[in-house]
Image (cartoon, coloured by chain):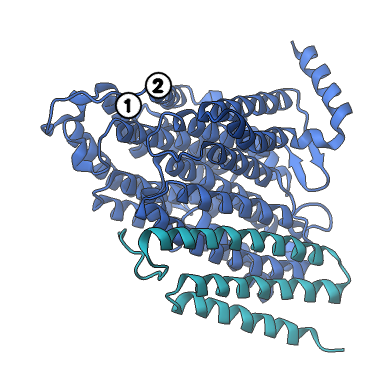
Chain colours: A cyan, B blue
Amino acid sequence: MIGMEFFLVFAAILFAIGLYGILSSKRGLVTLMSIELMLNAANINFITFASYSGNAAGQVFVIMTIAVAAAEVAVGIALMLNAYKINKTTEVDELSTMRW
Amino acid sequence: MADIFNSMIDALSDLLGQGIYVLPEIILMVAAVLSPLLYFITKKGTASAVLTFVLMAVSAVVTCIMMHTVTYGTAFGLFEFDAFSSLMMLLFLAVGGLTVFISQGHVETTKHKGEYYALIAGAVAAMMFVASATNLVAIFVGVEVVSIFSYALVALKKNDPRSSEAAVKYLIIGALSSALTLYGMSMIYGVTGSLDLYGPDGIVAQVSVMAGNWPFIIGCVGMIAGYGFKISAVPFHSWSPDVYEGASTPVSGFLATGSKKMGFAVILKIFLVMFVAMETGVLSEDFQMVFAILAAITMTVGNVVAISQTNIKRMLAYSSIAQAGYILIVLAVMSQYAVVGGLFHMFTHVVMKGGAFVVVAALITAGLGERISDYNGLAKRAPFAAAAMMLFLFSLAGIPPLAGFTSKFILFSGALATPAGGVDLTWLWLVLVAVLNSAISLYYYARVVKAMYVEKPQTEERLPIGRAFTVAIALCVIGVIVLGVYPNVLLDLCSTAADALFALV
């Protein structure tokens, strides 16, 4: 059987890639994708812990998270579309009329 | 009288079983479902507003009756209705009721009335679920529902570039915070093997053996960062000024007074209980220090940056960050008396900050701008609004005998008091920072008062204040004065709630 640490390290790398994507990318949609990566890294953690300890609660949490993430992306893309219609851009840098 | 209540509760619990402990939330969810439907049929925003307001009032009455008859218990193993959660529910209902009450007469509110009231009712219901949740899944999903609803509420002021920009920023930062929270929760689940917070196998029961366990610490840090975004603690605060400026004013008030208190409810339910359960371990002291530093930085940054603001909503946003810093003192001190002070400060914050946002909303509806220089000579143009604004701002600064002074006094003295009635000087430096910050804050609040009362107005034209606004402002003024002079009205409830919170350990 594959050791638990492989899954956890994989999830940690995925989380780090997502975090890097949010901090470095200026595009709104890429940010949304990076957030999906981070959420799924946490999901992998939950499933790993659930399956190695034989406790099903973690798997239930993952199903809930998937539903919540879907709702979040649906609203998120609507907001991006709205921002594009009004400001003609979804680049995070250019959405900066308000500062300090 | 008590017999009627008891028989009512008996009948309801026969009907609903365990569901009676989530009855207040269910009533609001009915409002959230019916409000768009009613708008679709009648095409009148007022119908939706009245329905939502009435159902919020019904929910508040049910909550009060359940508190009065001490009908406390757990629903489905997920939601615990106790003295703490019921008090927080009343706070959220008050915030929601105030928002709905002023929205109909407000000029910035969207034309999609049905959806607007549904989003507010749904967000309040989710906040109430979070206040009573005892399980990480319920807390996470509840907080996410509130977040998603708030993104939509911020963006609903359509055709305004600032609103859509604020919504995108809020979305990105909010989603980042929920990802951090989720990763933290997964670590805590991995270490403890449980998603339940309390109970013999719960997370809290296992924290005493967690010192030096690094996945547990990563989990705690992830969750502190995630919920730090919700309460807009520095350095996670950058979204809140943009969002409060971009959103329509009733929504800004709703987020500043409601959504932030939900973050505090979560932090109290998870971290306070967890750290108290650790007793005097090394880990607990480290986390206390983390929260003390967060509190000190949050109040200082909030107050110092507020000085240079020219937009009144942005200034209120920074002052709201500073208020979050004061409440964070509770997490550093972790004594029961401090929790009472923190809960009381949350309530007074609702009347004074909510009141200030109501005044701003009323003035925007009357045609005044958002800049502080637009408030020049307001005392001649709208005397009642100017006087009320002065009371709210002085209360926020903490001038006796207003509510803000009383709650700050209880909060700060709670940080120094020991259960035996003595004085503990461990957190003296934090209290000194907080008192100095109150002095700084007086400067920028007084600047607005000076603009209203000393400066010359550009025109002498009177500003008409709508009737709903007048009533809402008057209610908040009464709240600010009554809670300042007779704090006992609420203090008893707050200390029962603090007892209930500490009983969870």
| Subunit bearing disc 1 | B
Q: Quadrant of residue B68?
A: top right
Give the residue at the far top of this rendering: B1
Amino acid at dot 2: Ala
**Count the marks: how many?**
2
Amino acid at dot 1: Ala
C-alpha span from label 1 to label 2: 8 Å
Q: Which residue is mark 1?
A: B388
Q: Which residue is mark 2?
A: B474
Q: Is residue B288 visible?
A: no
Q: Quadrant of residue B224?
A: bottom right
Q: Viewer-proximal residue, B294 or A52?
A: A52
> What residue do we see at 38% from left, 39% from top?
B108
Quadrant in the picture for the N terminus of chain B: top right
Give the secondary structure at mark 2.
helix
Q: Viewer-proximal residue, B254 or B335?
A: B254
Q: Is residue B164 visible?
A: yes
Rendered location of residue B270, percent (x, y): 66, 54
> What residue do we see at 49% from left, 34% from top?
B99
Question: Same chain for marks 1 and 2?
Answer: yes
In this rendering, would B21 be left or right of B182?
right
Q: Viewer-proximal residue, B430 or B84?
A: B84
In this rendering, would B429 be left or right of B188?
left
In this rendering, would B18 be left or right of B488?
right
Task: Say which label, 1 or 2, has the lower sequence index.
Answer: 1
Disc 2 packing (10 Å; few <14; some 14–19; many ≥20) = some
